[in-house]
Image (tube, helix red, strand yellow):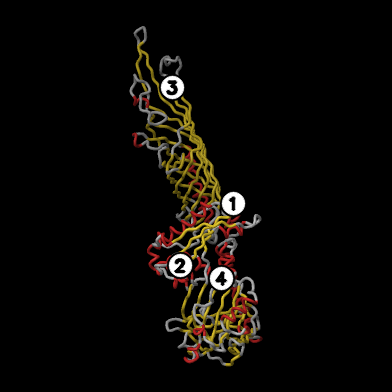
Amino acid sequence: MRLVAYIFLTAFAAQSIFLVKNASAQSVSLAPSSIGTVRLSGSIEFLSQFHAVQFLNMPLGVRETIDNAEPNTAYTFRYGMGTGFAGSIGAEIPLASWLSAGLSLRVALPQAMLRSDTLRTLVGRADGTEARLVSLRMMDTYLHTIGTELLFRANPLPAPLQGVNLYAGLRGDIISRKDYYVREEMLPESDGGFENGLRVRREKRDELPEVRNWGIANFNAAAIGGLGVEFEFGTNRVFSIEVRALADIGVFNIFQRMDAQGEFWRVNSIRGGIALRYYPERENALTEIEYRLRKIQDMERNVVTERARIQEDLRELKQSGIAASIRRIVGIDETGKELENPVIRVAEIQTVRTQEWLPMVFFTERSSVIPARYRRLTLDAVKRFGTETLAKQEPMRSYYHLLNIIGKRLQEQTQASVRLTGYTCLVGAERNDVNLASERVRSVREYLRATWGISPDRMQENVERVSPPENTPDSLLSEYRAVRISSANPEIMRPLEFRGVVKTASPSTLRIDLDIRAGVGIKDWILECTQFDGQEIKTLNSIRGRSEYPSSVYLNMSNEAGSVPNTGSAMSLKLDVTDFSNRNADVPQLEIEVVPENAAVQSRKRLYSSTITPDSSPAVFSTNSQTLGTSNKRFATLTFADAEPSPAFCDALAARLALPRTALRLVAQKQFSDGTISTARSEHLPEVKFYQRLVRVDVSEE
């Protein structure tokens, strides 16, 4: 300890002399270093440890005396001393011009000896004289550690004491080696030896038990404070060497629960050593005068660059500009006829839509549990359910409410009954499994009974055997893992019917002819169609592009996309164009008048829609021929997603609608039903094949 103090005081004096000379020899200081630059450091230190201890035995908690003839307290360890070496490597980040934080990896290799009170005993000799027995318990420990150290280094002192650093921080260690050797030794002033004939007894070598502080095995921590004197050297003072002394105060006992037993073992230490530090931010550092001169030069260069850029922009503006306009707006009606200066006429059309559904519940292989994709309701939800809630859903999503549709209609038709038919296949993994088919029927019956309160007397159970060919693939056998629901009452099995109002616009399409010119090129453009609905501006449609632009763009107004305007205020067309110089064109905003459709014309319009399969036999519409009318302006659109319907089906459909075959238009649409049918996860489901074959029939009358 005296050596550490002597070295530190000598270094402090030398640093003061060094800084005074350096300050007088150097008329300028370095420019401020950048905050956040990582500095590297390493250190080697000599440790002097002080062990504050009070315990009797290892392992802890052994309370019996070591020698029954002697008092227990005489053998209690009281103090200890230790020495060793430690080394660390790390990095630090400056937080301010006078403060930095460093984190380092540290390894310490100390060795210590603990001592008990001295035991003195008088022993009588055979000749009547007295002998003395003076002994001492000793424990050699090797508490080698590895851990991390967080140190805050501050040097707020003015010159010439700027090299004096103050330290504060924390250290966390894991004890990597914890051997000990305990014994009782007879001191030199004693006569003779112990009962074993030796001057040493009760020897034991072992490893200290594992403990946990903060839930971490063999963990210990210490608070750190200290002082250092730093000498800078090298070009621009890139390196420094520091002589420092630090004091560590142990936070925890070496072992847990010692305080509760009136015992303790804490380790405090004083360490002195040297640290080498590297300042990378000083590699190209400038003196204060050089630093200010460089800043002035940079500012001059920026002014020259900015002046050149402004002059270049002025030349570009003289050579070319940016201009854009909406040259013309043309309306296109359903027949393809073009209308100059269009006025949008909005009609609200009464609609009737019917939808065929599949009366089958399909099950997973070897399972009688209704799959999760079929929607099951709670008792509270049953009270709120109605088929009108399915109006905005695609056909396949509506199908998954199959059991709720049946339950709702059975509640309404109190005299109606249903037949539940389960199938068992004579081939495949479920070969002739009648019990499984019966369990599936009971699952359907139980849901209708428990959720919808349908009496079992109104549900007839049946099992049928089917015999597909032996080589039928598994994907087709899944169609037989099902329960079919049927009823003699047509109200139970009738298609879903929805009534509502659809907004249409005439003309339904706008063609906008554009004219855009930019000498330096177009960066991006956007055309927006908006309308003020009384509370906010609503965007009905928008089209955008980059670099190039079409001579004409088309805006479609449809009820499904929400792009049909409301009556009462005009639509606005706004064109924004930006060139590669980030200049914007000034384009006037244009308005298109929106008016309600003529009441007489609107009252004559009706739209009927039905979703069916090409091989279905039920009537297409629930309405009668008088409701459909006989107008010669009526036409039908047949939309399909899978294969085009056969000519025979189209002829029969036209006859059913009392239309000439030429009034039936066929439209292919890639994804007609619910988008889930196109996903790889759902393509194997048997109901998908049914809904992929759906076609939609729309009848319009003008």
Disc 4 designates what residue? 673
Crowding at label 3, few (<14), some or many (≥20) Cα neighbours within 10 Å? few
Task: Tell me the quarter of the image containing the C terminus.
Answer: bottom right
Task: Tell me the quarter of the image containing the N terminus.
Answer: top left
Instruction: Please name the amino acid that badge 3 sits on.
Output: Arg
Question: Closer to the N terminus: mark 3 or mark 2?
Answer: 3
Secondary structure at badge 2 equals helix
Nearest to the eye among marks 3 and 2: give it. 2
Q: CA distance from mark 3 to mark 1?
A: 77 Å
Contact between marks 3 and 2 (CB within 8 A): the answer is no
Q: Where residue 405 is drawn, which disc sits there? A: 2
Instruction: Please name the amino acid that badge 2 sits on.
Output: Ile
Crowding at label 1, few (<14), some or many (≥20) Cα neighbours within 10 Å? few
Question: Closer to the N terminus: mark 3 or mark 1?
Answer: 3
Nearest to the eye among marks 3 and 4: give it. 4
Disc 3 designates what residue? 202
Secondary structure at badge 3 equals strand
Instruction: Please name the amino acid that badge 1 sits on.
Output: Ala
Image x and y of residue 685, in percent: 57, 61
Q: CA distance from mark 3 to mark 4?
A: 89 Å
Disc 1 designates what residue? 429
Residue 524 visible? The answer is: yes
Q: Which one is nearer the viewer's eye here, 411 or 589? A: 411
Image x and y of residue 140, in percent: 47, 29
| Residue at position x 45%, y 66% in the image | 406
Question: Closer to the N terminus: mark 2 or mark 1?
Answer: 2
